[in-house]
Amino acid sequence: MDPLTSREGAILLRVARQSIEHGLAFDRPLRVDPADRAGRLGAEAACFVSLYRGDDLRGCIGAITPQLPLIEQAAESAFSAAFRDHRFPALARHELDGLRISVHVLGPLQPMPITGLESLHRQLRPGEDGLVLSCSGRQAVFLPVMWEQLKTPEVFVEQLLRKAGIARGEPLLGLAAQRFVVAVVEDRAEG
């Protein structure tokens, strides 16, 4: 996947932060300026927005398949990460100081031909692959950044299955895996 240009990255981060600020004021995501929809930013693309305070995750929401122009998906995902991530209370105004934003633009999902967990472990590329696992009507996703905490394919997959609500030892009927790579842009904390 091609990296984002510095201009594209700067626009994505600006719009993500503005969408959070707009959400604090108006309880809805920012409407994107048509001028920000040029080129790659106006093409449909999947992305996640992660929010951090210090080293701690403060929210992460996104889409794994393209549904909106990239710039609009970034605005929607930033708003949702700040106010709709069920793992955290809604972001408060005082938390804007020191808030760090990362936008992860996903490449296409690539189905992985797997015959079980061992074949999945062998095919994964630590540090590079994001992963979507589906099984028995449940699904979960990890961005490649999760390799920083979950260093081996075995631990990475085990924790992703847990995130999907699949208990250790549960039959993995119909297990399906899709990998993806990302282009990441990240700001420094403001404030």
Image (cartoon, rainbow, N blue to C red):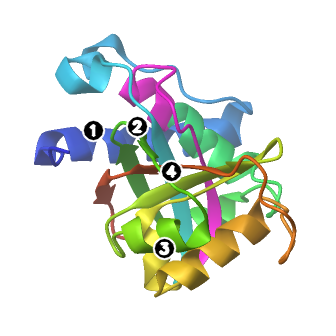
- Mark 4 and mark 2 in contact (Cβ < 8 Å)? no
At label 3, which amino acid type do we have? His
- According to the image, label 1 marks what residue? 11
What residue do we see at 67% from left, 42% from top? 80
Relative image position of residue 116 (x, y in whole percent): 61, 63
Packing grade of label 1 (10 A; few <14, some 14-19, many >=20) is: some
User: Mark 3 vs mark 1: which is more N-terminal?
Assistant: 1
The span shown in magenta is 56-74
Label 4 – label 1 distance at C-alpha: 14 Å
In the drawing, does residue 28 fall left or right of residue 102? right
Label 2 – label 4 distance at C-alpha: 11 Å
Observer able to see residue 113:
yes
Secondary structure found at label 2: helix
What residue do we see at 24% from left, 46% from top? 9
Eye-nearest disc, 3 or 1: 3
The C terminus - image quarter = bottom left
Secondary structure found at label 1: helix
Relative image position of residue 34 (x, y in whole percent): 33, 12
User: Mark 4 vs mark 3: which is more N-terminal?
Assistant: 4
- Along the line of sight, which residue is nearer the eye, 105 or 81? 105
Relative image position of residue 159 (x, y in whole percent): 68, 75
- Mark 1 and mark 3 in contact (Cβ < 8 Å)? no
Tell me, for residue 15, which label it has, or none. Answer: 2
What residue do we see at 68% from left, 52% from top? 175
Question: Is residue 72 magenta-colored?
Answer: yes
- Mark 1 and mark 2 in contact (Cβ < 8 Å)? yes
Secondary structure found at label 3: helix
- According to the image, label 4 marks what residue? 49
